[in-house]
Image (cartoon, helix red, strand yellow):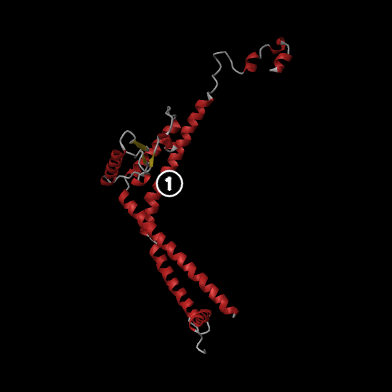
Amino acid sequence: MNTSQPVALNLKHFDLDQQREIVGLIENYFSTNNHSFKYPYPVYLIMDQEKTITAMPSVRTIEELPKFFNQKESKMNVKESHLIGKNKLLQQALKNIDIEQIHENIQNFSIMHRRVYELEKERLFYRSILHRLVKVTKNE
Amino acid sequence: MNKKKLLPPEDLKGFEEFIDGQSSDDSFLPRGNSPKKYLNFEHFTFLTNDSDRLTKMKDLLMDKIPFVTKFDQGQKLINEQLSEIRLLKKNIFGICNRSDSGYRRSMSEIFDLFFGSPKD
């Protein structure tokens, strides 16, 4: 769905309760089919619900969508056709990646780095204490 | 505009088309339409940016993340940090545990203040 262009799903025509249900169905679609709503192009939801109900990016009005979504149509020249061809190849390459595996790797990487950051903070704290203690001991 | 008025019309004979800036003769090529050119440039820039974005994303997802996962340095860093933290704690405790250390003196002052010194 979002392999060659950004997608925005407009849920504004539904009631608030229905919007919530549909968001759940859309999320299920992506998780069961091992598709990503982030790569290569994001899938946006246009709805009245709060952003916190879903991990998918959402906006309240069409005008709030990123500039990427508002492009004018025109006839392409040779250079542009060449670029489009290159982009299609890249999109195809991105389509073949294992999204679940990538997500897991990013998750593990972030957890590891958070731990490194916390330990580094602790190490610097003890180091500053030790420096002050050594300074005081020398002065006595 | 003023020059045109100042010069006599017979001196400008043959140059009227150049002064007006646009030839009415069909053999002249038409002037480029600047808004259209701008629009084309805009699309080309958009496509170039999209291409850069996709290339970066491909590098990240297909090269960098698998590489980082394969040769993960995180656990080694954590082990080194833990060993250094242990060493720092040991040194701090060693300094504080001396009989003449500032920590002990402060603690004895506090205790003496609340419970009275041993001499009393």
Horizontal relation, residue B40 to residue A53: left or right: right
Residue A16 or A99: which is nearer the viewer? A16
Q: In what quadrant of the picture does the C terminus of chain A appear?
A: bottom right
- Mark 1, residue position: B56
> Image quarter for residue B69?
bottom left
Q: In this view, does B18 lie above or below A13?
A: above
**Quadrant (top left, top right, bottom left, bottom right) of the N terminus of chain A:** top left
Dot 1 alpha-carbon crowd within 10 angstroms: few under 14, some 14 to 19, many 20 or more: few
**Which chain letter goes with mark 1?**
B
Mark 1: which secondary structure? helix
In x, y percent, where is residue B77? 42, 65
Amino acid at pointer 1: Lys
Q: Is residue B88 above or below residue B117?
A: above
At 50% from the left and 70% from the top, the residue drawn is A127
The answer to whether one can see residue A95 in this image is yes
Q: In this view, does A120 lie above or below A130?
A: above
- Horizontally, residue B48 falls left or right of residue A3, namely right
- Residue at position x 48%, y 30% in the image: B40
Residue A11 placement: quadrant: top left
Regarding residue A98, the answer to whether it shows in the image is no
Q: Quadrant of residue B19?
A: top right
